[in-house]
Image (cartoon, helix red, strand yellow):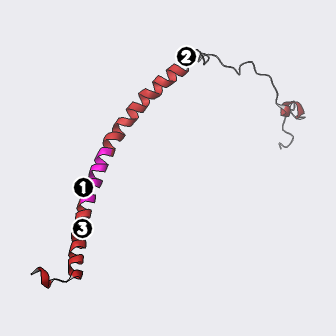
Amino acid sequence: MIKNINKKTIIVIISVVLLIGLGVGGYFYWNNLEKSKTKVETKAPEEAKSATEIITESAAQGVLPSIGANPLESKPDVNPADKANPFKDIKTNPFAQ
């Protein structure tokens, strides 16, 4: 019975079986890959938040000023437009009717 089947038919049958096997295997692999991604994605933001808080606390110890301090409260007035505006003291609109 095997002697009656030529080489070309055997190659076609083997390739079809391999393609079906790869398709089924790929489907299960892809399906499991998506499930594992959702598990990791739900855990990742919580872990990242706690890790960020820990790193921020350790890095900011004694370095940052207090929140109530405003370094720009006593900044100098360096706007050149305030000094160069000749119409600053005019109180009336010259174009009013």
Corner quadrant of residue 65: top right
Say which residue label 2 marks.
Answer: 61
Q: Main secondary structure of the magenta part?
A: helix
Q: Cα distance, mark 1 to mark 2?
A: 50 Å
**Which mark is drawn over residue 78?**
none
Q: Quadrant of the C terminus?
A: top right
Q: Earlier in the sequence, mark 2 or mark 3?
A: 3
The residue tagged with tag 2: helix, strand or loop? Answer: loop
Disc 1 secondary structure class: helix
Gap between marks 1 and 3, in whole Å?
15 Å
Work out whether 56 lies above or below 13.
Answer: above
- 20 or 85, nearer to the observer: 20
x, y percent for residue 85: 88, 34
Residue under label 1, please give it: 28
First to last magenta residue range: 25-36
How many residues crowd around disc 3 within 10 Å: few (fewer than 14), some, or many (20 or more)?
few
